[in-house]
């Protein structure tokens, strides 16, 4: 016997211990009876996905705007240094252009997915409210991107684009 026997007594039932109630057993159905299926829990995964993608697209646009303004403000405050070191300036500008390109077209993809999944959620009643909000956010992103794309391409200031 070790010194820990007093710490861990046996698991034998005491006569005054409460016994848990027995789980009622349902009798099996008759061979020809139709058994109703248990109520299925409604899943809202599609609506949640639309609701997450819509604001993510909006958030991506806001991040893109902040990056553009921060880069512009940095270029203005360091204008003398920027003109002396043209290679670094062009490299930074190219990096910002690549990031903005990814954000712009990523926002279009996320907006389209939010609209499609939101419509599916609303039609199939799989998170209808979240799906509607996903559609609203997705449409805001898509409309803003289309307006920006039309404004830039019709301005006449884009290299390689002739009007």
Image: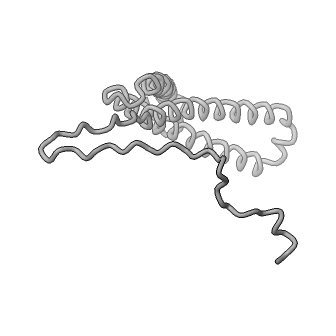
Q: Is residue 87 left or right of residue 54?
A: right
- The location of residue 154, given as percent across then percent down, is 46, 25
Rendered-image quadrant of the N terminus: bottom right
Drawn side of residue 1 relative to residue 150, left or right: right
Q: Residue furthest bottom?
A: 1
Most foreground residue, 26 or 149:
26
Q: Position of residue 14 (x, y in %)?
A: 67, 53
Report the residue at 60% width, 46% height from top: 98
Foreground of the two, 78 or 23: 23
Identity of the residue drawn at 85% across and 32% down: 77
Q: Position of residue 17 (x, y in %)?
A: 65, 47
Is 89 left or right of 134, judged from the image as shown?
A: right
Image quadrant where residue 163 sits: top left
Quarter assignment of residue 4: bottom right
Could you say where residue 39 lies in the image, as x and y percent from the top left? 34, 34
Q: Nearer the viewer, residue 5 or 77?
A: 5
Closest to the observer: 87 or 14? 14
């Amino acid at each position: 016997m070790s010194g820990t026997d007093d710490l861990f007594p046996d698991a034998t039932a005491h006569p005054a211990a409460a016994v848990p109630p027995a789980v009622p057993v349902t009798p099996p159905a008759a061979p020809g009876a139709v058994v109703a299926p248990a109520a299925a829990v409604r899943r809202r995964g599609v609506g949640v996905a639309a609701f997450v993608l819509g604001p993510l697209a909006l958030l991506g646009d806001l991040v893109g705007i902040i990056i553009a303004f921060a880069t512009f403000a940095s270029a203005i405050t360091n204008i003398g240094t920027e003109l002396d070191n043209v290679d670094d300036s062009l490299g930074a500008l190219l990096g910002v252009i690549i990031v903005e390109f990814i954000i712009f077209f990523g926002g279009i993809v996320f907006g389209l997915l939010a609209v499609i999944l939101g419509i599916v959620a609303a039609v199939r009643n799989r998170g209808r409210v979240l799906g509607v909000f996903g559609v609203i956010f997705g449409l805001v992103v898509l409309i803003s991107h289309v307006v920006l794309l039309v404004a830039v391409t019709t301005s006449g200031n884009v290299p390689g684009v002739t009007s």
